[in-house]
Amino acid sequence: MGTLRNHVQLIGNVGQEPTITNLESGRKVARFSLATNEFYKKDKGEKVQTTEWHTVVAWGKTADLIENYVTKGKELALSGKLKYEFSSRPDAILR
């Protein structure tokens, strides 16, 4: 079997205006939320919509593009990798 990769593609709507941060190193980082929707029918034909929220983080030139073109509500298709961040603080609530 070939090498497995951590790769994801999402299509959704931007949930908030991107937050842009310029780091001391000169790199730029963009953060925003993205809502993806799934539609299905229950047994009796009732239509159901579920929404999943994703936190998106982009760096460098991609962050520049986000700063210039991405706004709240815009439909966006993106690809990248998944990375989960958990707090190591004992009083933190994991969600």
Image (spheres, rainbow, N blue to C red):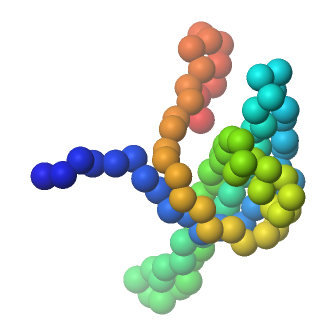
Q: Of residues 1 and 84, which is closer to you in this image? A: 1
Seen in the picture, residue 56 relative to 72 is either above or below; the reply is above
Residue 22, percent across and down?
84, 32
Q: Residue at x 49, y 47 (%)?
A: 81
Residue 15 in view here: no
Residue 66 in view here: yes
Q: Of residues 68 and 12, which is closer to you in this image? A: 68
In the rendered structure, the answer to whether residue 68 lies left or right of residue 88 reads right
Q: Residue at x 84, y 35 (%)?
A: 21
Quadrant showing the C terminus: top right
Q: Quadrant of residue 23?
A: top right
Q: Quadrant of residue 19?
A: top right
Q: Quadrant of residue 78?
A: bottom right
Residue 45, percent across and down?
48, 89
What is the residue that sits farthest to the top in this orientation? Answer: 90
What is the residue that sits farthest to the left in this orientation? Answer: 1
Seen in the picture, residue 37 relative to 57 is either above or below; the reply is below
Q: Residue at x 49, y 44 (%)?
A: 82
Residue 37, percent across and down?
60, 69
In the rendered structure, the answer to whether residue 39 lies left or right of residue 4 reads right
In the rendered structure, the answer to whether residue 39 lies left or right of residue 75 reads left
Q: Residue at x 86, y 58 (%)?
A: 68
Q: Of residues 38 and 46, which is closer to you in this image? A: 38
